[in-house]
Image (cartoon, rainbow, N blue to C red):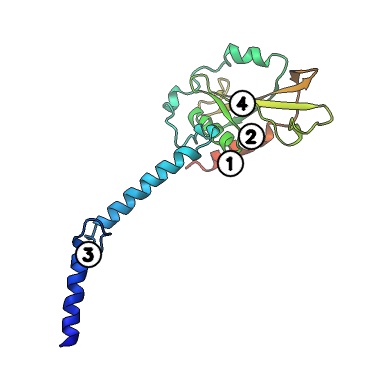
Amino acid sequence: MNSTFRNVVLISFVLMLSACSNTPKLFWDTDEGRDQAAGSGVAGAAKGSSAEIMPEMAAESASGRELPMAENIATSGRLPEKYSQQLAGLEDLNTRSYGQTTGDLFSATIDAMITLNYPVDVVDSTHGVVTSDWIRKGENNPNVPSMIGYTRHRYIAHIYRDSAASDNLTKLDIYVLGQIFEKGKWSGTTLQHLSEELYSAVSEHLARLPH
């Protein structure tokens, strides 16, 4: 009898607590708690991510960016004049051919730069041009003088159809624009063997594409 009385009192006490608006809910509907937990998680993630996104990550992976249709990429096979003028007499050019569409090669080039933590500067789909901002790291770190002084470099990648080959053959030209800091200003210089890393990363991304 005493046990039954205690159970009745305990149940009444719990129900009274549940009815109070100022106390945490002790009972949830089947889906109610799940929805509120998910909503709070999304809100928390959104609040945290807005402060954590770094400026250079604004150039997101090509798999997440909205690119034009493949046939609208690299419709012009000639490098725009504004880039040609920048590169006049300063470029270290390497070129390679691929059996991929210009769209696939264009996307792979963007993804490769992001993977290598190169700050993407220009994405010009019409002319098939992707450029990086100035890069200063490793032996070219401006904070560590090398044998030739402080240096920096940037990449200008040009994707286009090879008019002399089949329709499926495309080319990737990588120009390396190098500069050296002397007498208080930057001037052009040639920095060798800096394109291989980018070419390798492009090939890796192309290899992941479905065949």
Of the residues tagged 2 and 4, which is closer to the observer?
A: 4
Of the residues tagged 1 and 3, which is closer to the observer?
A: 3
Query: For the residue marked with disc 3, what is the amino acid?
Result: Leu
Of the residues tagged 2 and 3, which is closer to the observer?
A: 3
User: Residue 133, labelled with which disc?
Assistant: 4
Query: For the residue marked with disc 4, what is the amino acid?
Result: Asp
Relative to 65, does residue 6 appear above or below in the rendering? Answer: below
Relative to 47, does residue 6 appear above or below in the rendering? Answer: below
CA gap, disc 2 to disc 3?
Answer: 64 Å
Of the residues tagged 4 and 3, which is closer to the observer?
A: 3
- Looking at the rendered structure, the secondary structure element under dot 1 is helix
Q: Kindly give the residue lying farthest to the right in the view shown.
A: 147
Q: Nearer the viewer, residue 26 or 180?
A: 26
Q: Dot 2: few (<14), some (14–19), or many (≥20) neighbours within 10 Å?
A: some
Q: Which residue is mark 1?
A: 204
Q: Which residue is mark 3?
A: 17
Percent of width and height locating residue 65: 44, 33
CA gap, disc 1 to disc 3?
Answer: 61 Å
Q: Earlier in the sequence, mark 1 or mark 2?
A: 2
Q: Are marks 1 and 2 in contact (CB under 8 Å)?
A: no
